Image (spheres, grey):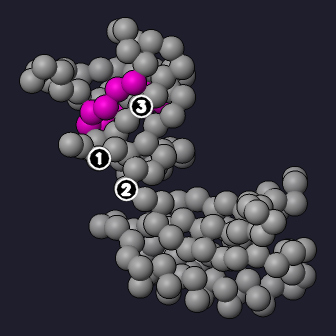
Amino acid sequence: MSETSEIIAKVTETVEPILAAENFYLYDIEFVKEGGSWYLRVYVDKDGGITLDDCVLVSDQLSEKLDELDPDPFADPYFLEVSSPGAERPLKKEQDYQRALNEYVHLSLYQKLDGKKTYEGTLIKLDNQALTIRVTEKNRERDVVVPRDLISKARLAIKF
């Protein structure tokens, strides 16, 4: 396991009880170097959406718990950022897809399906093999079944 993977695993273990106590959930963790500085980014959410006050609450508690870790898993100083994953967050894990049911999504495909490499619509069904989205084309709705192995990227989308 790489040093970064070990840090992410330790932060996950540390933040999960904090989030569980608040009925929040962990969306993702990044530990990256940008412009010579290290950033630990923890993305959290809850049903109905996360607020700035929620992020501050998690940040304060997590910062305190990380400072108490012995041995310290961080070899270098870092900036801790706790935030929402955003309105157009990527769908990475199975639970992300489950939470996106009945939501508007954008799918990018590795190859064309029915002549298109991207689809936007409401995610109405999912299983291990495929996602079904309801798309509107020329004021007509139709359901498109997209095999999971064709999906290169999936994210929530804002419907205009």
Q: Residue 136, position in %: x, y?
A: 18, 26
User: Residue 112 occupies which quadrant of the picture?
Assistant: top left
Secondary structure, mark 3, is strand
Give the mark nearer the N terminus: 1 vs 2.
2
Distance from Cα at disc 3 to Cα at disc 2: 15 Å
Question: What predominant SS class does the magenta segment belong to?
Answer: strand
Which callout, 1 or 3, points to the residue nearer the camera? 1
Q: Quadrant of the C terminus?
A: top left
Residue in the picture at 63% in, 83% down: 62
Q: How many marks?
A: 3
Distance from Cα at disc 1 to Cα at disc 3: 13 Å
What residue would you read off at disc 1? 158
Q: Residue 146, position in %: x, y?
A: 40, 21
What range is drawn magenta here?
Answer: 118-130
Using the image, tell me which numbered label, if any, was put on residue 62.
Answer: none
Residue in the picture at 34% in, 67% down: 49
Using the image, tell me which numbered label, if any, was put on residue 87.
Answer: 2
Give the mark nearer the N terminus: 3 vs 2.
2
Three-letter amino acid code of the residue under disc 1: Ile
Q: Are marks 1 and 2 in contact (CB under 8 Å)?
A: yes
